[in-house]
Amino acid sequence: MELDFLSLTRKYPFPEKRPRHHVAPYLYVPYVKLKVVPQNYPLPISSLDWTKVFQNGKSPDFLDIGTGRGWFLLQIAVLNPEKNILGIEIRKNCVDWLEMVIRGEKIQNAGILWYNVLNGLNFVEDKSLEAVYYLFPDPWPKSKHEKRRAMTKETLGELINKLKVGGSIFFATDLLEIHKFHLTLLKEFETIVSCKEVPSQQSWDLPATNKELSCIRRGVNFYRIIATKVTEILPT
């Protein structure tokens, strides 16, 4: 099965010409810290029936955080038909569009959730994932906005716990300060993960995201890291 993104957008028109990169700041806040829960805030999830997420009814092997319009997620699903990939996205219009595409194209091993990763991943089994993708996230580069970043020490620790030994988290960003921020966070787990920086000129055997293709077209440098879990997290 082959996919063409332009053909998909013609077949399944997106409700907006282009989804906004940033959304309302309160969507980047954990549920427990909200004084009032907005109507368009994705509620926390404690457990899931995977038969309602994936057409094949199986649990996820890969996790894509910040799926956007999902071109990366769809490509990974098609290239790895024996593996399930779960996308998490905070923009409801992107989620609705991807659900339409996944159903329409009968992609058995792709699933998408309208969800905020800051509310935890209790619905994903510990030590079950082979890969996590955190590619070109909403950067919030200013230090005063750091609290809105999805990748925190707590989030990273939970993601590492969800990985099997030998599983990896893939990071990518076009902002040097965010790349350094990721390296700083990973240093907190240096006894558990082994990190490798991958230059933008070097292939890392993953499909390019829309953002990565845009960077290449514009000659913008970007930064990538592969953090591989080498041991189990020891109890504290």
Image (spheres, rainbow, N blue to C red):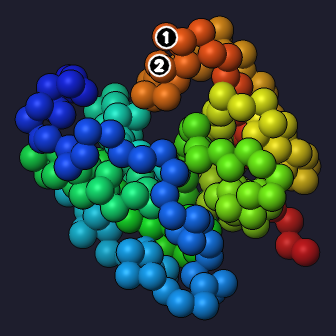
- Residue 8 in picture, x, y percent from top left: 17, 32
SS class, disc 1: helix
Q: Which is nearer the eye, 232 or 216?
A: 216
Residue linked to disc 2: 213
Q: Is 112 displayed left or right of 230 in the figure?
A: left
Q: Are marks 1 and 2 in contact (CB under 8 Å)?
A: yes
Q: Residue farthest to the bottom?
A: 35
92 w.r.t. 200: above or below: below
| Observer-nearest of 220 and 224 | 220
Which residue appears at 20% of the width and 44% of the height?
A: 14
Specify whether residue 60 is in view: no
Q: Residue at x 64, y 33 (%)?
A: 172
**Above or below, 152 relative to 209:** below
Please rate how many residues cluster around mark 1, counting C-alpha atoms within 10 Å: few if below 14, some from 14 to 19, many from 20: few
Q: Is residue 114 left or right of residue 234?
A: left
Q: Amino acid at mark 1?
A: Arg
Q: Is 1 situated above or below 163?
A: above
Q: Which quarter of the rendered picture does the C terminus lie within?
A: bottom right
* Rendered location of residue 38, percent (x, y): 45, 82
Please state, as top left, top right, bottom left or bottom right, where the N terminus lies in the image: top left
Label 2: element kind? helix
Q: Which residue is label 1 attached to?
A: 217
Q: Residue at x 65, y 33 (%)?
A: 173
Q: Is residue 93 visible?
A: yes
Which quadrant would residue 199 be assigned to in this image? top right
Q: Nearer the viewer, mark 1 or mark 2?
A: 1
